[in-house]
Amino acid sequence: MKLGMEITVKQMYQIEENGHQMGFPRQLMMENAGASMVKNLVNQFGDLSSKKVLVFAGLGNNGGDALVVARHLAGHGSSVSVVLLGNPKDIKTVECRTNWQVLQKMKSVSIKTLEDASSMEPDIIIDGILGTGISGTIREPHASAIDLINHLSAYKVAVDVPSGLNPDTGETANKFVKADMTVTFHRMKRGIPKRIDLCGRIFVEKIGIPPEAEMGVL
Ligand SMILES: NC(=O)C1=CN([C@@H]2O[C@H](COP(=O)(O)OP(=O)(O)OC[C@H]3O[C@@H](n4cnc5c(N)ncnc54)[C@H](O)[C@@H]3O)[C@@H](O)[C@H]2O)[C@@H](O)CC1
Ligand SMILES: [K+]
């Protein structure tokens, strides 16, 4: 067990796949990721029941994590709004879709358009737009969502990595989120410590992946 080692995105996907093959499903990795983020928010803010939270979710598993956070925050009594950055039918993964379907049944979480969000005044923003699956120039509506996050004054929390930051190199795309806190999962990705100016307070959270999933990878 190589403690404290920083890993690459490629290694993360290999570890994730090994864990999944061992029978620890991605869905549970996602649930643990979202729950660990909320634990850090409770540590940061104490009582979350008076907080207005605006969640931005992409259509991949970074977005899926953010949808888990939305559900948990509703349980804490926060006033939660979710902006999905695309049409639900275009959601890319079963893990993200599963969490979207649960939110559809929850009156305690309100679904907003990017338009609605531009006139909101949240206390906390969750950036679940892009994670390790980022590639190339940021397309719409993700680019406008990143601009809006940077424009709004709230406490900004990045899921796994600030959207627009390359987790391997620390390079930024044409648009990138400047976060106050970043909660990254399983292990530190190499590019994150290079940009603490964009990540803010960084927390690395284990999400239950068996250490044996790293064999042959690290
Ligand atoms: N690897 C792991 O073990 C785990 C990963 N999890 C989460 O999964 C994330 C990775 O999920 P994915 O692989 O689905 O990838 P992402 O969710 O990071 O991104 C993929 C989505 O972003 C879009 N996208 C990519 N580049 C874009 C661009 N330039 N402009 C606009 N859209 C763009 C893709 O079309 C796709 O919809 C991680 O960052 C983490 O948050 C967690 O669920 C926990 C487990
Ligand atoms: K993110």
Image (cartoon, rainbow, N blue to C red):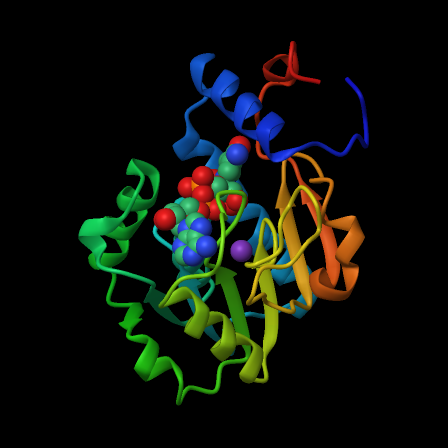
Whether residue 187 is situated above or below residue 105 in the rendered picture? above
The residue located at (28%, 52%) in the rendering is: 100
Say left or right for 43 vs 93.
right
Residue 158 appears in which quarter of the rendering? bottom right
Q: Residue 177's x, y, as percent?
A: 59, 67
Residue drawn at the location 64% of the way across and 59% of the way down: 172
Pick the quarter of the image with the N terminus: top right
Q: Give the residue drawn at x 48%, y 87%.
A: 121
Is 48 left or right of 2, judged from the image as shown? left
Residue 215 visible at all: yes
> In the picture, which quadrant includes the C terminus?
top right
Camera-nearest residue between 80 and 169: 169
* Residue in front for this viewpoint, 23 or 75: 23
Residue 63 in sight here: no
Figure check: 63 above or below 113 = above
Residue 85 located left or right of residue 21: left
User: In this picture, is 34 found above or below 110?
Assistant: above
| Residue 127 place in picture, x, y as percent | 51, 62
- Numbered circles on residues, count: 0
Q: Position of residue 13 (x, y in %)?
A: 53, 28
Which residue is at 65% across, 69% downward?
Answer: 178
Give how far across and how far down residue 18 sits, in percent. Answer: 51, 16
